[in-house]
Amino acid sequence: MNILIELDEATYRRLEKVAPAKSRKRSAFVRAAIQKSLWELEEERTRQAYLQTPDDDPPAFDPWVWEPLPYGGFDPPALDPRAQVLPSGLEKRRARTSRRARSKKTSSRASHK
């Protein structure tokens, strides 16, 4: 759809600075300005409606007594049966450390021969 509008000289100059006709940005700018203005009008109507009829219903639940579900309500993550992981991850760290210690001992024995 096309709309033809008339602008006063001052508004036209301001528009030309922001979205010159040669840049092909003018149509997008005008569309965005109209959409923003319409949205602001709708928001103001909604605000006025809430002022006339406030939402006095009690909350559906008391947020102060809410407790989060474990894992956010999702299934817990599947554990790899091969992994030797304690909740703190200590077992894996111990295994890595002991492998390093063993490899250092064997390399130092090989260098002494």
Image (cartoon, helix red, strand yellow):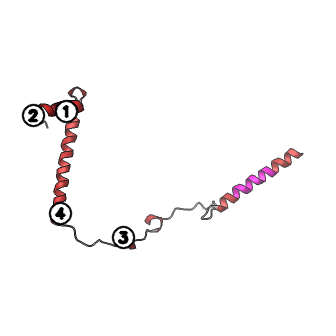
29 relative position to 82: left or right? left
Residue labelled with disc 1 = 14
Residue 29 in the image: x percent, y percent?
22, 37
- What type is the residue that disc 4 sits on? Leu
In terms of sequence position, does the residue under pointer 1 or pointer 2 come before the other? 2
From the viewer's side, name the closer residue of 64 and 25: 64
- What type is the residue that disc 1 sits on? Arg
In terms of sequence position, does the residue under pointer 4 or pointer 3 come before the other? 4
Q: Secondary structure at mark 1?
A: helix
Residue 20 makes an appearance in the image: yes
- What type is the residue that disc 2 sits on? Glu
Residue labelled with disc 4 = 51
Residue 1 in the image: x percent, y percent?
14, 38
Q: Residue at x 19, y 33 (%)?
A: 15
Whether tag 4 and tag 2 are in contact, CB under 8 A, the answer is no
52 relative position to 64: left or right? left
Residue labelled with disc 2 = 6
Q: CA distance from mark 3 to mark 2?
A: 53 Å
Res. 31 image quadrant? top left
Q: Is residue 5 above or below residue 112?
A: above
In terms of sequence position, does the residue under pointer 3 or pointer 1 come before the other? 1
Q: Is residue 96 above or below residue 24?
A: below
Whether tag 4 and tag 3 are in contact, CB under 8 A, the answer is no
Whether tag 3 and tag 1 are in contact, CB under 8 A, the answer is no
Q: CA distance from mark 4 to mark 2?
A: 36 Å
- What type is the residue that disc 3 sits on? Pro
